[in-house]
């Protein structure tokens, strides 16, 4: 890949991974517009590592607290501080893990098409619009195990390309009465084990395929996706603390129509 392709794809991944607008829709549209060949599995892994670094850095203090309280709750066998939130993140990951193991090949072979991505971009954009109107005031500390399971089941739907993992989890949380910021923060925390699992699966595939790795390209991809994802998280949380999800709804509808026209 040339430098321009690396930079553009890295920034697309970083700026769209945590927004409710579907990174897969953008990553399929960009090569079509610029006439690029597929960037390859190794580069995809690098971009996921970058976004993982970003979310870990942004929520480092919360993650440390959650892990400490989680370990303490296991030790004394009762809830401690933020341990419930920690359990919620772990349990909320189970549905997507099971769905991924069960349907990964089918999704990759059958559903990863521009038409499917266009349809899901439109459908779940409208779902976000209706959910945003029901935004409540509950914070992420009010997330129970039952709520985590419901949001986790919604997250499993995001295996369908174009749905947007962050978008569907925020939609579910909003429908359950959580605030926009709480919905986004829990979505970002929930992304950590998902990115780890997905990245691990891609690394296994990469090893099995014996792909030749160009390390300079991967390091640049990691750095750019990490920086752009961190910036995205920071400004997105600030934006929705004062405004609604409506701009992202409009953007999704516009993007979906473009995909339908292009493909």
Image (cartoon, rainbow, N blue to C red):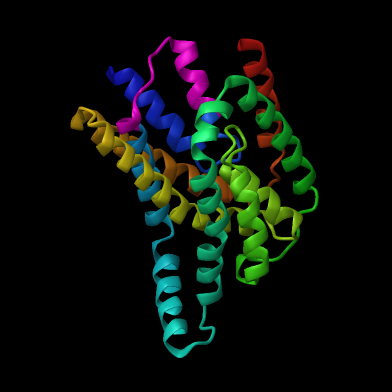
Q: Which residue is painted at 57% across and 60% down in the image?
A: 92
Residue 77 in the figure: left or right of residue 40: right
- In the image, 5: left or right of 29? left
Q: Residue at x 59, y 36 (%)?
A: 160
Q: Main secondary structure of the magenta part?
A: helix
* Extent of the magenta region: 25-43
* Quadrant hosting residue 201: top left
Image coords of residue 263 (percent x, y): 61, 12
Q: Which of the two residues, 182 or 207, is positioned nearer the viewer here?
A: 207
Task: Please state the horizontal and vertical placement of residue 90, each as a whole percent of the image.
Answer: 50, 64
Where residue 64 appears, as percent x and y from the top left, is: 39, 70
Quadrant placement of the N terminus: top left
Is residue 82 visible from the viewing direction of this image? no
**Against 80, is 29 above or below?**
above
Residue 205, how many percent across, how many down? 33, 37
Residue at image position (31%, 38%) is: 222
Residue 251 in the magenta stretch? The answer is no
Query: What residue sits 64% from the left and 20% below the top?
Result: 115
Position of residue 119 relative to residue 186, above or below, is above
33 shown above or below 6: above
Q: Quadrant of residue 19?
A: top right
């Amino acid at each position: 890949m040339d430098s321009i392709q690396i930079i553009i794809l890295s920034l697309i991944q970083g700026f769209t991974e945590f927004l409710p607008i579907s990174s897969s829709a953008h990553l399929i549209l960009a090569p079509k517009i610029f006439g690029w060949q597929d960037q390859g599995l190794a580069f995809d892994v690098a971009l996921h590592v970058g976004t993982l670094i970003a979310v870990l850095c942004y929520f480092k203090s919360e993650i440390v607290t959650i892990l400490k309280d989680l370990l303490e709750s296991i030790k004394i066998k009762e809830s401690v501080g933020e341990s419930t939130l920690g359990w919620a993140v772990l349990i909320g990951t189970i549905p997507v893990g099971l769905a991924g193991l069960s349907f990964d090949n089918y999704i990759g072979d059958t559903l990863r098409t521009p038409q499917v991505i266009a349809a899901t971009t439109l459908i779940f954009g409208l779902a976000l619009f209706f959910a945003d109107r029901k935004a409540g005031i509950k914070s992420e500390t009010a997330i129970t195990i039952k709520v985590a399971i419901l949001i986790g089941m919604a997250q499993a739907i995001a295996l369908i390309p174009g749905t947007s993992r962050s978008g569907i989890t925020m939609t579910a949380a909003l429908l359950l009465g959580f605030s926009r910021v709480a919905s986004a923060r829990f979505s970002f925390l929930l992304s950590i084990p998902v990115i780890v699992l997905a990245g691990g699966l891609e690394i296994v595939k990469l090893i099995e395929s014996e792909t030749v790795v160009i390390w300079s390209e991967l390091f640049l991809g990691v750095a750019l996706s990490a920086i752009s994802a961190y910036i995205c998280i920071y400004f997105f949380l600030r934006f929705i603390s004062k405004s609604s999800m409506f701009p992202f709804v409009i953007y999704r509808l516009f993007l979906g129509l473009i995909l339908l026209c292009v493909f």
